[in-house]
Image (spheres, rainbow, N blue to C red):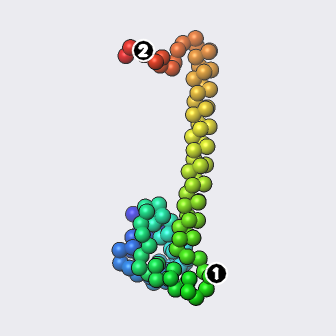
């Protein structure tokens, strides 16, 4: 288990705070907060009691502080962008393979692609 996953699991299971984990591992509190929010967004986990308490307190005190949902939405947008980039790469890869098969069929005069309904 890598350090990032270990920190996320420790936060979710032991209920320690971001500051406590930041001091323990020497990683900034905001980084740990973002990791947890992204992990919760990917795995559809509900916010912890501390996160709900912080979100409620921040809504009452100042509208400038980001809430857990905005960071989760941001994490989801980043995930969508990464998946779109991966999809684009996969399409290019499939097109390259298709082109290679076309060239091989033309140059070698053999049928590489399986014909529908062919006997095995």
Can the viewer see residue 25 in this picture?
A: yes
Residue 5: in sight, yes or no?
A: no
Residue 103 spot, x, y in % from top left: 62, 20
Query: Can you say which quadrant of the picture contains the N terminus?
Result: bottom left
Quadrant the C terminus occupies: top left
Percent of width and height locating residue 53 = 46, 83
Q: Nearer the viewer, residue 53 or 23?
A: 53
- Tell me the quarter of the picture where residue 104 sits: top right
Q: Please state the total of marks drawn on the protein image.
A: 2
Badge 2: residue crowd in 10 Å (few <14, some 14–19, many ≥20): few
Q: Residue at x 58, y 88 (%)?
A: 61
Mark before the other along the chain sequence, 2 or 1? 1
Element at label 2: loop
* Mark 2 lies on residue: 118
Question: Which SS class for mark 1?
Answer: loop
Residue furthest front in the image: 60
From the viewer's perspective, is residue 35 above or below residue 29? above
Q: Position of residue 39 (x, y in %)?
A: 46, 65
Among all residues in the image, which is located at the extreme bottom? 61
Q: Residue at x 57, y 30 (%)?
A: 97
- Label for residue 64? 1
Question: Separation of disc 2 and disc 1 at Cα?
Answer: 65 Å
Q: Is residue 28 above or below residue 1?
A: below
**x, y (%) of residue 52?**
46, 79
**Quadrant of res 117:** top left
Residue 106 vs residue 65, the one in the foreground: 65
Front: mark 2 or 1 = 1
Side of 116 relative to 105 (left or right): left
- Name the quadrant containing residue 95: top right
């Amino acid at each position: 288990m890598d350090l990032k996953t270990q920190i996320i699991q420790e936060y979710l299971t032991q209920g320690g705070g971001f500051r406590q984990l930041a001091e323990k591992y020497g990683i900034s509190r905001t980084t740990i907060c973002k990791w947890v929010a992204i992990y919760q967004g990917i795995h559809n986990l509900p916010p912890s009691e501390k996160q709900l308490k912080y979100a409620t307190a921040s809504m009452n005190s100042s509208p400038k502080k980001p809430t857990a949902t905005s960071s989760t939405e941001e994490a989801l947008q980043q995930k969508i962008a990464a998946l779109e980039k991966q999809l684009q790469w996969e399409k290019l890869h499939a097109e390259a393979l298709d082109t290679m098969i076309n060239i091989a069929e033309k140059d070698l005069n053999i049928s590489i692609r399986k014909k529908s309904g062919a006997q095995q």
